[in-house]
Amino acid sequence: MAVKAIVFSDAQAGLIKTAFDEALEWGSEELTGLRGEIKRFYLTEQARRCCYCRKQIQTN
């Protein structure tokens, strides 16, 4: 099953550039919203299934 890639808005792309420029950790508070958006996108795109084994993913 092919999954389409997320397309970032200009604001998200700017945040990603800032994160790289400032060497922010992935777990930093500044990236909380972006992490959530990426997670929601791929959970929806993959129909809440693991991309490797296709088992249903349970999340809160």
Image (cartoon, rainbow, N blue to C red):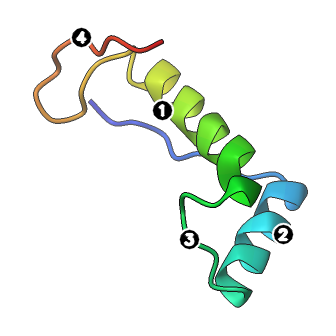
Secondary structure under tag 1 reads helix
Sequence-first tag of 1 and 4: 1
| 27 vs 34: above or below | below
Mark 3 belongs to which amino acid? Answer: Glu
N-terminal-most mark, 4 or 2: 2
**Residue type, label 2:** Gly
Seen in the picture, residue 46 relative to 38 is either above or below; the reply is above
Residue 16 rendering spot, x and y as whole percentages: 71, 68
Mark 1, other Cα within 10 Å: few <14 / some 14–19 / many ≥20: some
The residue beneath circle 1 is 42
Using the numbered discs, state the Cα–Cα distance from disc 4 to disc 2 in whole angstroms. Answer: 33 Å
> Which residue is at 79% across, 56% downward?
12
Label 4: which residue? 56
Q: Which residue is mark 2?
A: 14
- Amino acid identity at mark 1: Tyr
Q: Residue at x 80, y 65 (%)?
A: 15
Q: Quadrant of the N terminus?
A: top left
Whether residue 43 sits left or right of residue 11 in the image: it is: left
Work out how far the residue at label 4 is from the one at label 3, CA to CA, in angstroms.
Answer: 29 Å
Q: Which residue is mark 3?
A: 25
Residue at 52% in and 35% down: 39
SS label for mark 2: helix
Q: Report which quarter residue 18 is drawn in.
A: bottom right
